[in-house]
Image (spheres, grey):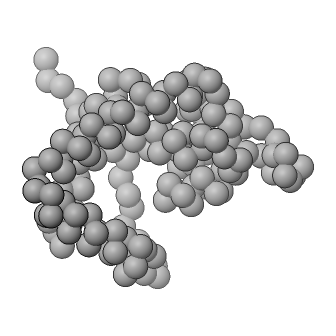
């Protein structure tokens, strides 16, 4: 299983580096992408992106400062606030979606058709089944923020 960890780390690092060129992190992109077209609260988005409450607040603050998203009152529940994507944010999602798709296509192109189908099928089965919910753990491992690698000049 260490192979999954290594592959995930390399993929996330490449994604972080490519998204950094647009001024956005993978975490911010995940939140923004999931918020497009929906009326989701901060808590719902946090769950969808696997983020804790504190990280989510900081992420939304960053997206608001960049003019990509804003907190608004929900039309479904007057007590709730939703995260709405601005026009600028929607443009960012369109740009990042292409980058993400290009990376995934490039990575998966190294597998032949049947290998790709088997790999994606097995990974989906694991993610939606046995690995869909983390085990109860007093001190679960923290997910580190993925940042673009620093270039040495």
Q: Residue 65: in sight, yes or no?
A: no
Q: Residue 20: in sight, yes or no?
A: yes
Task: Please give left or right for residue 113 compared with residue 137 in the image.
Answer: left
Q: Residue 129, relative to residue 104: is it above or below?
A: below
Q: Residue 79, relative to residue 105: is it above or below?
A: below
* Residue 33 horizontal/vertical position (percent): 51, 42
Front in this rendered view, residue 108 or 127? 108
* Residue 29 horizontal/vertical position (percent): 46, 39
Looking at the rendered image, the quarter that the C terminus falls into is top left
State the residue at coordinates (28%, 31%).
18
Query: Which quadrant holds residue 139?
Result: bottom left
State the residue at coordinates (70%, 51%).
41
State the residue at coordinates (18%, 51%).
108
Task: Please give left or right for residue 129 compared with residue 51 in the image.
Answer: left
Front in this rendered view, residue 95 or 114? 114
Query: Which quadrant holds residue 16?
Result: top left
Front in this rendered view, residue 86 or 46? 86
Task: Please give left or right for residue 118 compared with residue 29 in the image.
Answer: left
Residue farthest to the right, as pictured:
78
Residue farthest to the front, as pictured:
113
* Residue 49 horizontal/vertical position (percent): 50, 54
Q: Residue 95, relative to residue 54: is it above or below?
A: above
Residue farthest to the top, as pictured:
153
């Amino acid at each position: 299983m260490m192979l999954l960890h290594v592959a995930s780390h390399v993929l996330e690092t490449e994604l972080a580096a490519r998204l950094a060129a647009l001024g956005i992190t993978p975490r911010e992109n995940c939140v923004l992408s999931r918020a497009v077209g929906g009326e989701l609260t901060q808590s719902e988005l946090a769950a969808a992106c696997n983020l804790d409450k504190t990280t989510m607040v900081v992420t939304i603050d960053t997206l608001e400062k960049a003019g990509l998203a804003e907190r608004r009152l929900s039309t479904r529940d007057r007590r709730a606030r939703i995260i709405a994507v601005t026009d600028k944010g929607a443009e960012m999602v369109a740009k990042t979606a292409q980058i993400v798709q290009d990376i995934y296509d490039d990575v998966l192109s190294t597998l032949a058709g049947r290998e790709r189908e088997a790999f994606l099928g097995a990974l989906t089965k694991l993610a939606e089944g046995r690995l869909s919910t983390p085990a109860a753990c007093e001190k679960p491992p923290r997910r580190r923020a993925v940042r673009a690698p620093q270039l040495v000049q």
